[in-house]
Amino acid sequence: MHNASIVSIVDDDESVRLATASLIRSLGWCVKIYASAEAFLRSPEFEQTACVVCDIQMPGMTGLEMQAQLVASGNRLPIIFVTAFPSDAARRRANENGAYFFLHKPVDAAEFTRCLQSILGSEQTQ
């Protein structure tokens, strides 16, 4: 596993969380999953997160609202947004606040892997 490189998945869809977590673990990274933005923001692993994979549309706080809260507090965590409902407005807002990638569901595993590797690096510890 990578040292202190937790990838946090924030998505209200359990099947998406589990499938994404499985892929990320297969690449050698530690994964934590959260059903909501609120749960992620109050988690003890928040400070150890190296990258966030986040849905845009969720009940309660949306992914974009979570990103805005992070930016307002001075935290610029790398975020990969994934959404089943892409829109130009959402993409623009995400990009304005520093999103690294904006992917459409279902996400292509190879493309997703390239995104993660560009953020976290491709070397894995054995």
Image (cartoon, helix red, strand yellow):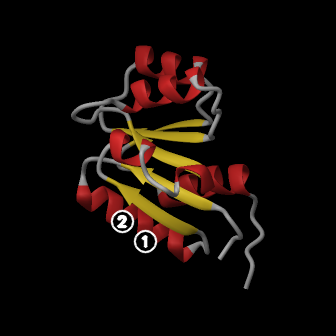
- Depth order, front residue of 23/109: 23
Circle 2 SS class = helix
Q: Is residue 41 left or right of residue 49?
A: left
Contact check, label 2 and label 1, Cβ < 8 Å? yes
Query: Horizontal and vertical percent for residue 68?
Result: 50, 22
Query: Which disc is residue 22 wearing?
Result: 1
Asked if residue 49 can be seen in this view, the reply is no
Question: Which residue sits at x=57%, y=37%?
Answer: 101
Q: Is residue 121 left or right of residue 35?
A: right
Residue 80 at x, y = what percent? 53, 42
Question: Gap in Å between the C-alphas at discs 2 and 1?
Answer: 5 Å
The quadrant holding residue 85 is top left
Q: Is residue 69 above or below residue 37?
A: above
Task: Residue at the far left: name it.
Answer: 59
- Residue 10 visible in the current orientation: yes
Task: Name the residue at 50% across, 17% down.
Answer: 93
* 89 relative to 110, above or below: above
